[in-house]
Amino acid sequence: MALVLVASFQWGENPIVMEEPQISQPQMNEKNKEPMLTEITKKEEKTPDTKSPASGKEKETPVAVVEEEQPKTQEEKPVLPENNKKQETMQAEKKLVCSFSVSCNTALANIDRLVPEKQPLIPSDGVLYKREDVVFNEGDTVFDLLLREMTAAGIHMEFAKTPMYGNVYIEGIGNLYEFDCGELSGWMYRVNGAFPNFGCEGYKLETGDEVEWVYTCNLGRDVGGDYAVQNGE
Amino acid sequence: MNEFKAYHPMVNFAFFVCAICFSVLLMHPACLFVSLFSSLAYLAVLKGKKALFTNLLYMLPLAFATALVNAAFNHEGATILAYLPGGNPLTLESVVYGFCAAAMILSVICWFSCYNEVMTSDKFIYLFGRVSPALALIFSMTLRFVPRFAEKLSEVTIARRSLGKDSGNQNVRERIKSGLSSLSATLSWALENSIETADSMKARGYGIPGRTSFSIYSFEKKDKIALALIFALSICVIYGRICGVLNFSYFPTFGAIRSDFAAVWSVFAYFLLCIVPIVIELKGMRRWKKSK
């Protein structure tokens, strides 16, 4: 049954999983119940879930279901708040957080070169996604984070996947595309101040990372990301 | 139904060059509508309503396929409708652009089928035989190739059937076999025929300087008027295009459709240009009815 639990959590189908405690509940007494619940929460944290900023609410849904079940046996009621607290503290301990931002200051600086139809798209401060600490899952790459955050925020983003290299190329964010601001323009990503020299699907996130997506109008030179600068030549 | 056909080849050719070029170049929704509407109408006038419906039968699925393919590969646009399974967004702008591109393709196909009805290969050779004899001959032979090949293929099939080689009620394997031998016979005929045509044209002295050729075309007053009209209206449309009133941006958001005098006049001039042959046909029909 534990296997089933893990598998179904990984697919994010919480409703199926929620039925599990219901079935096993009548057989358990108070003492058995507690470790069982913590086990579930542990597994839940390990599994990747799809929307991290909004996930705060979603993660608590299994607990909420348990709450509804509780009135069946009155003695179990006081146990609940304790469980909730436990879950929260465990989350805080294992939380994987990194900062994330998307900006296009260079497009703002070179607005005369920008395609006229795209000029109204550029925010006046050049920030498409304000710097924010976001939660990510174990094993997430920079691309996973970008895709999830852009989808959650409703910001347009187009990418091209190349199965041959197992990597993706970001063509445009917020309808600001490569080549929109001169032939040397496009999106680049920076982690902890450095530009990795490979695709964003290849960069595995670590907690505390500072991920920045920046738009360049000059092949990275205007954001300090050209090859010569990075190699000190 | 032969009114516009009876005009000088130069008038016919000038009209189709303008109509097809503007259909491809002007992606403004109003222009696309004008082009699609008038090309379908002219096709109906030329070939009859029945032919129009059979054409639409394969054109509509083609249009839908074009629109779907565009939406599947083009993700630009500010209005996100949904997310595709791959993770890329499906946007309203790309869907609308797909349908507009489909309308453009349909109108160009319709214009070309009208072209094939009106501009016969002798007209084309008459216009360009002097300028570039080899190119004109190749072009007219190429345009003529597909219908001629289909005709010959059915001839070969009938001949084979009369010999008892293809009874019509065999299994799939047999039918493919017999179809292939018909095809091979027709192919060798086509190769031989093209060489024969070239030899025959050479024997007649085609392309030799100083050689004159007979033609029944004469440039009359009505041709002058029609050509001047086509030329004037084209200038109006080109002017509208240069001014930008006929430009329309689909990405990232739809541009505004202008309704000032210049924009309306450009679209109206384009409409007048597209219906020139239809008006000529209708005028001819009325005169014919009156004379009876």
Image (cartoon, helix red, strand yellow):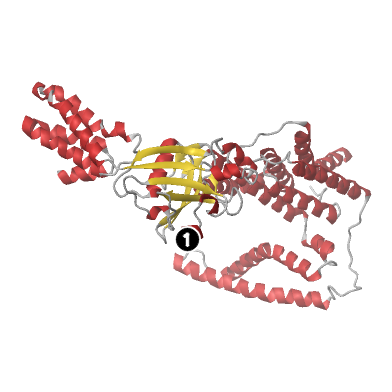
Q: Which percent across, then down, holds residue B24?
A: 69, 49
Badge 1: chain ID: A
Residue nearest the observer in this picture, A207 or B106: A207
Residue that appears at 30% across and 50% down: A139
Q: Quadrant of the C terminus of chain B?
A: top right
Which residue matches tag 1? A232
Q: Which percent across, then down, holds residue A169?
A: 47, 53
Left or right: residue B33 versus residue B136 is left
Q: Which percent across, then down, holds residue B189?
A: 65, 74
Q: Which residue occupies the extreme right position in the image?
A: B221
Q: Quadrant of residue A52?
A: top left
Q: Residues within 10 Å of mark 1 (few under 14, many from 20)?
A: few
Q: Is residue A149 visible?
A: yes
Residue that appears at 68% across and 34% down: B257
Residue nearest the observer in this picture, B203 or B79: B79
Q: Is residue A113 above or below residue B175?
A: above
Left or right: residue A164 versus residue A94 is right
Left or right: residue B257 versus residue B174 is right
Judged from the image, the secondary structure of the residue bearing numbered disc 1 is loop
Q: Which residue occupies the extreme front position in the image?
A: A232
Report the label total: 1
Left or right: residue B239 versus residue A39 is right
Amino acid marked by disc 1:
Gly
Q: Which percent across, then down, holds residue B219?
A: 91, 54
Q: Quadrant of residue B97?
A: top right
Q: Is residue B165 visible?
A: no
